[in-house]
């Protein structure tokens, strides 16, 4: 199976809403966000001995104790056998949450059509016109729009979320983000926090918006989506 694993977190109470989950991290990403706190995954440099067989053995032992599995990254949709990996997890009667950056809408569409995912969290990095600057890659923003529309029209739970750096995203930009994901179920703002490792060390002194400014952003987003919160 072509599915490269960068890490495993055996238990989480936070990453899959209202579920006890394990988190599988995949290697590799087609973005190069400066604030990424998993730079070893991004650059395919994470060293471990975790194979898919190790994951499946672990899950067999956790039946009845875990509700679901979160597949995150990196960017999971880059994995050639993502679908096969998820199928095997579903055969073990676990729920599946997928984290994605939305650059592979065809894969997202296939997973939705075959009912292989129960929850999707999609990152909205910026207004579409700023995407390439924020992710440090030239990308097709049309693919981002397609993935957004797939989730908006799906029958599963989903959320959109944005990590906020004031130097990259202005308060006014959130009107454009709101328009992009209009009528979404849930949207979360995530404060930028310096982790032990960060992709671009020049951002360590980056300052967040104030609580008052975050409240202002939430009020903007509530004009467009059904639920908005600072996480």
Image (tube, helix red, strand yellow):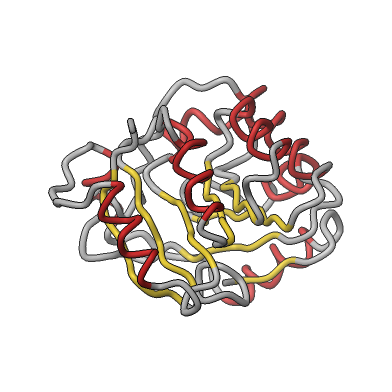
Q: Can residue 31 be seen in this view?
A: yes
Residue shown at the point (59%, 61%) measured from the top left: 95
Residue 187: where, in percent of width, then height?
69, 59
Residue shown at the point (80%, 45%) measured from the top left: 154
Residue 195: where, in percent of width, then height?
28, 65
Residue 152: where, in percent of width, then height?
80, 44
The image shows residue 198, relative to residue 59, as above or below, that is above
Q: In which quarter of the image is residue 33?
A: top left
Compare residues 190 and 152 and report the one nearer the observer. Answer: 152
Residue shown at the point (32%, 64%) measured from the top left: 58
Compare residues 2 and 209 and report the one nearer the observer. Answer: 2
The image shows residue 20, relative to residue 221, as above or below, that is below
Quarter that holds the N terminus: top left
Judged left or right of residue 146, residue 95 is left
Residue 165: where, in percent of width, then height?
47, 54
Compare residues 23 and 85 and report the one nearer the observer. Answer: 85
The image shows residue 145, relative to residue 21, as above or below, that is above
> Across the whole image, how many numbered discs are drawn on residues?
0
Q: Is residue 199 visible?
A: no
Quarter that holds the C terminus: bottom right
Judged left or right of residue 231, residue 149 is right
Residue shown at the point (51%, 22%) measured from the top left: 139
């Amino acid at each position: 199976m072509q599915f490269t694993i960068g890490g495993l977190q055996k238990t989480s109470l936070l990453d899959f809403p209202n579920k006890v989950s394990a988190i599988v991290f995949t290697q590799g990403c087609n973005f190069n966000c400066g604030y990424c706190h998993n730079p070893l995954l991004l650059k395919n440099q994470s060293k471990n001995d975790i194979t898919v067989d190790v994951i499946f053995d672990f899950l067999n032992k956790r039946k009845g104790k875990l509700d679901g599995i979160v597949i995150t990254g990196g960017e999971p949709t880059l994995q050639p056998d993502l679908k096969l990996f998820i199928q095997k997890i579903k055969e073990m009667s676990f729920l599946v949450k997928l984290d994605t950056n939305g650059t592979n809408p065809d894969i997202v569409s296939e997973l939705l059509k075959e009912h292989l995912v129960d929850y999707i969290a999609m990152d909205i990095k910026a207004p579409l016109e700023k995407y390439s600057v924020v992710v440090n890659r030239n990308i097709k923003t049309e693919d981002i729009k397609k993935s957004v529309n797939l989730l908006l029209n799906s029958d599963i739970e989903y959320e959109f979320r944005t990590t906020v750096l004031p130097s990259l995203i202005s308060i006014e930009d959130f009107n454009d983000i709101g328009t992009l994901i209009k009528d979404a179920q849930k949207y979360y703002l995530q404060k930028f926090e310096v982790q032990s490792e960060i992709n671009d060390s020049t951002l360590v002194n980056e300052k967040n918006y104030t609580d008052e400014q975050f409240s202002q952003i939430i009020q903007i987003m509530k004009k467009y989506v059904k639920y908005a919160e600072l996480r």
